[in-house]
Amino acid sequence: MIFFGCSKKESNDITVNSSNDSLFNYLSLANDFSLPREKRKIFNEKAFNIVINQENDSLNRVNLFRVANRYYNINNWIDFSKTVHLVLKNSESVKDTLNLAKGYTYLGDYYGAQAITDSAFMYYSKAEKMYLQRNDVFSLARLRLNKALLQYNEGDFLGSEIAVFKALRVIKGEKANDVIYESYNLLGLIYNELGEYDKAIEFNTKALASIDDKIIPVEFQSKATSFNNIGYIYQNLNNHKMAISYFTKGLEQENLIIQKPAVYAMLLDNLAYSKFKLNNIEGLPEMYYQSLKLRDSLKLTSGIIASKFHLSEYFVSIKNIAKATRYSKEALLLSRSSKSYRNILVALKQLAVIEPEKASVYAKEYIHINEELQKTERNMGNKFTRIEYETDQIKDENINLETKNRNLLFGFSAFTILGLFLYVIKSQKAKNRELLFKQEQQKVNEEIYNLMISQQSTIETNRVVEKKRVAQELHDGVLGRMFGVRMNLDGLNKFNDEPAIKQRISYLSELKNIEQDIREISHDLNREKSELINNFVAIVDNLLEDQKKTFKPKLLAKIDRTIKWELISNSVKINLYRIIQESLQNINKYAEANSIKVEIKKRDGDLFLTITDDGKGFDVKKSKKGIGLQNIQSRTTECNGTVDIQSKKGNGTIITIAVPFENKQILI
């Protein structure tokens, strides 16, 4: 009948590399509340398939948690549990305490959703101690709030109240509107159950006032949740007019049925019930049916039970005993299968009224279950205290075991310290030799590159000189001779006979044309500029031309001609050249590709080199130790860059190198 309204939130401290655009898109779509649940599930599965193939690093574990969040938001508990156990395993293998604590919290959420309260409380307690050690106040406050909600659901209202105030005490003075909202919201629910309705209204009103759309996404429909909770309190006070006004406000929230169908169904059912209590049956029982259908599609067991109780009460009022009995018995059966003892009591009480001839049987079962329920609730606080004690006891035993193991380790270490010391010295010498070798190799690379540049410059210089020589020859030689001929022809003016004049005019005209043509050629040759983009680009072009002439695959090259290569260090350029060379060699040897694409461009402050082929591909994990890939990785590291290799058997290969610009003026 009431709703807490918390959901997993997206982490805001994640930076996604541009090479993982597809993963980022899938995660974004999986968290798009406007999409149907099934589509969001498909997108999240695609994201999961990408993440599990990545290396177990901090970013990988963060992405696994993001996938788990989205499974949580669509109530896919099986895949949520699988993902959380995977990230816990990865965190344990590298002793990542931050993600271990987060994983324990998620497991607590999972077992809480499955109503396995012992396990949920145990994992929450483990996570709480880790957050205390890290002094992570926000995570600690949210964790204590989760424990409080667990105690509330188990009927330990006083223990839940204490836990909420513990959470609020931790974040006192901090800006944490989302935690404050959920704390006030839960306190409102607790005081409602304790019958302290004035306090319940006070804290629900505070919760409503604390909603900040910048911190709590509107998709969570927090306002609709608070309106429902306040309306439910007035319903308990039999002030159904006030209750209806709040339920109506809740239903008026934009996109409610799309973003939070469970809240929409709850508000609709509560509104129908308050109208029924005011003898306003307009729209009944259709509103009950609509709410029941929606709850049934979402598999909301407690909501389905509530709808059937209300339908049974409605049909009793219109003397349709058959339908009233049917809905009460269905609610009783569902309450028993879900072990919802409070709802079992409500169903038995209602059936005793509908079927008075069986009232004694129902009353006997009611008394028995009520006594057991009261006994359980009395022991509930002790149970949670015992779980915390047992968790501490296990932790102490683990600490003692760790101490013994540490002492044993120190004993064995005493016998091996000398050997390790010698090994370190030897290893350091080897590293120094390797460093010297790399330095020498770097010098050789620089010399090779400078030679290549010098050779290319010489070629271009000779080309320009030759062009100038041809232009000068045309201008000074041919044009000079043509000018002499024209002068001789001018001397024929003394002959005035008709044929000589015509012939002379014809020759002069022709010679002028030739003179003009040659002059234009000469000027064009002198004006022509050698529009080399850069010697580096010319060298790369030569490499690509050799590839086209020598090997079968079709090669497409695209180089951003606006990049100022002269501002990039020779070390970066030679490494990029060698990476292209190495990649083309690998493709020619192994890929059996039909086409290759080489692209160099600038984007977002980085220089990107992408080499794509449609060959047979390979298993990236199995091939990481290959010399070719190691060379590419090593050269990228020397450039302070990152390399991303995506390949699957039969799907070709994409190699993306991202190198940061040393001088941001390159971007201009």
Image (cartoon, grey):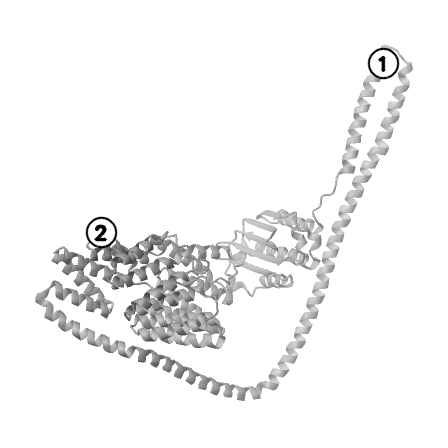
Considering every residue shown, the one lying at the far left of the view is 357
Answer above or below: position of 78 versus 608.
Answer: below
The answer to whether residue 1 is seen in the rendering is no
State which quadrant residue 107 falls in: bottom left
Helix, strand or loop at mark 1: helix
Task: Decide: is 594 above or below 633.
Answer: above
Distance (Cα) linking label 1 and label 2: 114 Å
Across and down, in percent, residue 63 comes to: 47, 63
| Residue 323 percent coordinates (x, y) | 15, 57
Tag 1 near tag 2, CB within 8 Å: no
For the point 59% across and 64% down, the residue is 630
Q: Secondary structure at mark 2?
A: helix
Residue lying at 25% horizontally and 58% vertically, measured from the top left: 240
Q: Which mark is residue 404?
A: none
Q: Quadrant of residue 205?
A: bottom left
Q: For this rendering, which residue is in front, 486 or 197?
A: 197
Name which residue lies at 83% across and 20% down. Answer: 508
| Residue 466 or residue 11, whichever sits in front | 11
Q: Which label was assigned to residue 501?
A: 1
Q: Residues within 10 Å of mark 2 (few under 14, many from 20)?
A: few
Give me the residue at 25% from left, 77% from top: 376
Quarter of the figure with the N terminus:
bottom left
Left or right: 437, with 384 as reference point? right
**The furthest residue to the top:** 498
Work out whether mark 1 precedes mark 2 in sequence or the reverse, and give the earlier one: 2
Q: Position of residue 309 (x, y in %)?
A: 20, 61
Report the amino acid beneath label 1: Ile
Name the residue nearer the viewer: 651 or 524.
524
Q: Horizontal and vertical percent for residue 206?
A: 38, 64
Badge number at residue 286:
2
* Amino acid on which the number 2 mark rests in the picture: Glu
Q: Residue 307: name its quadrant.
A: bottom left
